[in-house]
Structures are given as C-alpha cells and as structure tokens.
Image (cartoon, rainbow, N blue to C red):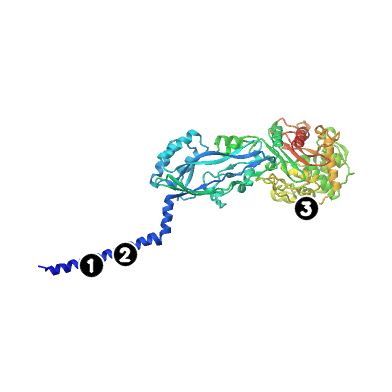
C-alpha cells in the first residue's frame, strides 16, 4: 500500500501538471485573443462592418435642359423601381426566390431573361438586377408585400426624365437610356453599374451627358441580422448635374414644327448668320422621346422604326440629299474665282446642252430655254444650261474646292451626335469608290447639285450664312454658353460674292425670279434666297418626250429645297427648308421659308 506521504506527493505532481496546462492554455488563449482583438482588430472590424453596414449609392438629379428664355425642355420626376440585390439572397435559396418573383407575372421579357442569366461570380458591380421601373401604386404595394416574405427585393425612389414638347424637340434634346456593357467598360463612372442609372443616348442628352449626369453620393446605413434598416451612419450628398441652356427660341421652334406638319417629311433650320447660333431646328416628323424614359415597349419601338417617313432620323444633320439648284451659287462662284466667267459673260440656253450624243436639259426645255443669259439672271431663273457651260470651263476640281471652302462635304461641327459629312465628289473619289473614270457628264451633273453630290440641310444653311456674313466660317451650335471661335476669313473677292447675292435677291424679288410669289412686301425685311429641286430618280429621254417628268408616285417626286436669309439689307437670319418629295422648291419650300422668317422676326 502507498503511504500517506506518497499519496500527497502524487497529488502535488498532478496539481502541478494541471496548473501548467492551465497556464499554457491561458497563454494560448490570451495570445489568440490579443491577436484577434489587437493585431487583427482592423481586419475583423471591417468584416463586421460589411455585415452590419451597407453602402448605398445615391444617383444625383440629372441637370435640366432649358430654352433660350428659360423655358423647361427636360426636367425630372420621382418614380419607384423594384430591384433585386443578389448578394442579399443566400446562394442555396436563390433559384427558389427567382422562381417566386417570376411567378408573380409582373416582369417584362428583358427582366426575366436577366434573371435566367445571372452572371458569375456575383460582385458589387453586378449584384443588382432591375425588376421593374416606373411602378404604379398597385405594383408598389405588391412588391412591398413580396419584399416582406422574400430576401433581396429593394424598392428604390429614383428620378427619371420628363420631356416637355417631346415631339417638337425630339431631335434636339434626344433621350436617355440604360448604359450598355460597352458604356460601362469605357468609363470610370461607377454609377453606371447601378441598374437605375441612365445616360444620354442621343441629342443634347448625349453631347453633354457628363455635365448633366452630376456626381453620385453614398449613404452608409446600419442593418440588423435580417438586413433590415437600423440607422443611417453617414451620408455624402450627391452633386446634381449642371443645367444646359440652349439657343433655341421655343416659340419659333413650335411654330416651325406646326408649319412643317402639313407635309409628310421635312426639315428646317433658322440660324444667326454671324454667330452660328441655332434659333430653330426641326426634323419632321418627330416622335415622343418620353417612351425612352423607361424600358421601351417593343411594339412602340417597331412602330417608330417601321414608320416610312423615318421620324427616328434627324434629317437636319443625318439626312443626305442632292442639293439641286442651290448648289449653282457654288458653281458660279468657282467660275468667277477661276476667271472663266465675269458678270458680263453670257451663254445661250436653248433648253438643251449637248455633250457628245448625250443631252443635258434645262428645266425650261419645253419652252425653248432662257435665251442669252448672264450669271445674275441665271441664278434668279435657275438656268441649268448656263451652269453646264461654266462647269465645262472651270472643271470639277475647282468646283469641289469652292464647295469645301463653304463647308460642304464635311461635318459642320454642331454639338449634336450623329452628324453626317455629305459628299463632294472628285476624280479620285470616283476612281477609288466606283472603280471608274470621272467624266465631263459627271461634272455637268455636279454643277447643278445632282449626280453624286450630297449635303445635309444644316450644311446648306451654313453655306449661305458664310456667303452673307462677310465670308466668316461659322460653326452652328445649340448650347448657349458654347465658346465661339473665329476661323480665318475666306479669300474670295467681295465683288464676286455681291454678284451671287444679287442673283439671290432677284430669285425672290424680281419679276422673273423662281420664288417671286414668296417675296416679303417689306423693304426693311426683304428675303433673298435660292430655290432647288432635288431629283430622286433619273428621267429617261423617252419619259421626257411623253411628258412624264413629274411622277404621280409620292416616293418618286423631287425634294423641294430653299436656302435664304433676311433681312436682305442687313442679314441676320439664315434659313433652309427641305420638303421631302415636295416637288419644286419655288412651289413648296420657298413659301414655308417666308413664313418661317416672318415668325423669326416676330419671336426673336
């Protein structure tokens, strides 16, 4: 048997061992607690805050767009959107939650497709899916009920666009829409990752999108274990976008749109000839840009793009037309500048100009032509044969150079996206694109604004403005505060310009001018200009002899063109009117220009 002494020694050793183990365990636990609470405090605090705190990005109010007198053209309104936050749904419950949301049959096809194609891995940039926007009260109540039963559904109060005079200003203002993947990738603006974010897609909305957008704010909120709101921890306010003030006179804009609405398709611009300031800018028909403030109804979109009169196209800057007889001033000026004609030069117009076996007709061919005619009268009466003769003598290169000097064949630089360059053809262009040699016949067609020559209505009003403002090239603009640059003055003789302008005065104000019926009977506000008719198909010799020079088919009728300015004694307003398939410029476009210029005098 063990003695009492031996038992006491055994107990003492065990106590020592246990005490040592407790000491070691205490040191280990203490070290671990020190590591967790001191050394790794920041790391675990951050993890805790991620569970406890939610950073909510706040979209800024978009800047407004206003007319020159302060009238609102684009403002904002509050709506509600339903959003699904994928990171708030446990992964094992995600399929069930999505199936339940889809079963409630509130979503459109696009939202359903996005729910079926959730990207992986889910992160802060793709965690949110827009379920439905612009909620009515019934939908809003339904989503609140659903949100109380399912995780991840968030109701957001957002601002969206409200466009006033939407159709009349559609091609100026443009519209906003959800950014594409490419939009997000080419910018550092993290706000574009939000499903409620909208950016400018067309028009002024696109040109000045960065300024209109503003800067996002961030709100940090504390949530409980069920991700319910507890309190707001911090709030950084968003910075509203800047307002954009336009040069558009709203009264004139609405009046011009009303005038053009009597036709199927047309365009008109009124511009300050000295500065390039746009006072009215109408492409008719317009369309309701408010349909783009939310997800677009596919049916409405089809109706828009299937419309044969092309309301979605901005005809002022993207419509390409043969300029017709309004190009004759360029041909005449090229001849004067090259010295192949003077103010006294005359050519005989018999109604036909023969080039080899081919006949080039004047519009007065049925009446035996214009007889012996000089440049001023040739402009006033729009004699084709005169300009055929000039073109043969001056050649395509000098005509093309004169056209480019006055801004044709290149963008005007207006602060709108989507502007087209038009086309001033050359020998090299035809060789490269058509794989054929340039002919004298091409030069004759070009001399009267036909053949390959193409221009936009805005280019034509810029051309006429440069002629009347002292040969100062100008850049058309729509934003009122836009800086105006002053390029070098064109080097043409003023007496040559005056001769061209005299011819344009006679177009409207002489007894034989093509637009004499549109004259303004006010010596303080006389209008000058040039009519044109742009052919859309070639009339054959046999059709001409049968008298079939004007088609009954609407789509084969000529476009009617007029470019002009007023007052003639002190030019201020430049105007262009183009009526698609409107037949003659004198018949259709010039009377509209008269109305428009009188309206400009009244409103501006």
Q: Residue at x 56, y 53 (%)?
A: 188
132 on left or right of 36: right
Q: CA distance from mark 2 to mark 3?
A: 86 Å
At mark 3, the secondary structure is loop
List the residue tagged with mark 3. Answer: 488
Assign the N terminus to one quadrant of the image.
bottom left
Residue 571 location in percent, x, y?
A: 80, 42
* Mark closer to the observer (2, 3): 2
In-front residue for pair 229/77: 229
290 on left or right of 23: right
Q: Residue at x 26, y 65 (%)?
A: 21
At mark 1, the secondary structure is helix
How busy is the neighbourhood of tag 1: few (under 14 within 10 Å), some, or many (20 plus)?
few
Residue 489 location in percent, x, y?
A: 79, 51
Residue 342 location in percent, x, y?
A: 88, 46
Examine the image and state in which quarter residue 570 appears: top right
Give the numbered dot on residue 27.
2
List the residue tagged with mark 1. Answer: 16
294 on left or right of 393: left
| Lower position in the chain sequence, tag 1 or tag 3 | 1
In-front residue for pair 3/81: 3
Give the numbered dot on residue 154.
none
């Amino acid at each position: 048997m063990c003695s009492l002494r031996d038992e006491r020694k055994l107990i003492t050793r065990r106590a020592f061992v246990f005490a040592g183990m407790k000491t070691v365990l205490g040191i280990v636990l203490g070290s671990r607690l020190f590591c967790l609470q001191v050394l790794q405090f920041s790391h675990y605090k951050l993890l805790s805050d991620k569970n406890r705190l939610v950073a909510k990005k706040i979209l800024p109010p978009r800047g407004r767009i206003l007319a020159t007198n302060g009238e609102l053209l684009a403002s904002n309104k509050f709506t509600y959107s339903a959003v699904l936050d994928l990171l708030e749904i446990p992964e094992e419950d995600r399929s069930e939650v999505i199936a339940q949301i889809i079963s409630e049959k509130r979503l459109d096809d696009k939202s359903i497709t996005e729910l079926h194609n959730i990207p992986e891995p889910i992160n802060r940039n793709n965690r949110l899916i827009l379920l439905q926007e612009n909620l009515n009260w019934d939908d809003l109540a339904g989503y609140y009920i659903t949100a109380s039963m399912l995780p991840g559904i968030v109701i957001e109060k957002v601002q969206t666009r409200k466009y006033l005079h939407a159709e009349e200003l559609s091609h100026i203002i443009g519209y906003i829409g959800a950014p594409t993947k490419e939009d997000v990738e080419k910018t550092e603006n993290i706000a574009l990752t939000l499903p409620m974010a909208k950016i400018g897609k067309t028009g002024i909305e696109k040109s000045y999108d960065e300024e209109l957008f503003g800067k996002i704010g961030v709100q940090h909120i504390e949530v409980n274990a069920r991700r319910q709101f507890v309190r707001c921890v911090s709030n950084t306010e968003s910075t509203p976008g800047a307002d954009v003030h336009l040069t558009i006179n709203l009264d004139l804009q609405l009046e011009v749109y009303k005038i053009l609405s009597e036709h199927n398709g047309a365009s008109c611009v009124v511009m300050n000839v000295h500065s390039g300031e746009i006072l009215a800018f109408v492409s008719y028909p317009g369309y309701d840009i408010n349909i783009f403030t939310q997800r677009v109804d596919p049916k409405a979109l089809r109706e828009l793009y299937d419309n044969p009169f092309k309301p979605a196209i901005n005809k002022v800057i993207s419509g390409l037309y043969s300029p017709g007889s309004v190009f004759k001033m360029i041909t005449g000026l090229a001849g004067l500048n090259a010295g192949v004609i003077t103010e006294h030069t005359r050519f005989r117009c018999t109604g036909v100009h023969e080039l080899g076996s081919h006949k080039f007709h004047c519009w007065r061919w049925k009446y035996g032509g214009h007889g012996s005619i000089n440049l001023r009268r040739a402009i006033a009466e729009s004699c084709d044969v005169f300009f055929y003769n000039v073109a043969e003598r001056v050649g395509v290169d000098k005509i093309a150079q004169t056209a480019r000097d006055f801004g044709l064949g290149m963008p005007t630089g207006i602060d709108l996206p989507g502007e087209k360059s038009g086309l001033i053809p050359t020998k090299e262009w035809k060789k490269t694109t058509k794989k054929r040699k340039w002919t004298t016949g091409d030069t004759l067609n070009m001399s009267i604004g036909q053949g390959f020559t193409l221009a936009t209505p805005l280019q034509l009003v810029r051309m006429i403005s440069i002629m009347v403002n002292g040969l100062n090239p100008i850049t058309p603009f729509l934003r009122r505060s836009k800086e105006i640059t002053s390029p070098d003055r064109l080097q043409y003789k003023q007496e040559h310009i005056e001769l061209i302008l005299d011819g344009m005065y006679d177009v409207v104000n002489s007894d034989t001018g093509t637009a004499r019926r549109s004259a303004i009977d006010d010596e303080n506000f006389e209008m000058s200009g040039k009519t044109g008719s742009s052919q859309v198909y070639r009339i054959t010799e046999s059709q001409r002899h049968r008298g079939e020079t004007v088609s009954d088919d609407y789509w084969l009728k000529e476009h009617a063109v007029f470019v002009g300015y007023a007052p003639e004694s002190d030019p201020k307003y430049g105007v262009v009117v183009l009526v698609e398939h409107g037949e003659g410029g004198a018949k259709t476009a010039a009377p509209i220009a008269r109305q428009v210029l009188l309206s400009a005098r009244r409103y501006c």
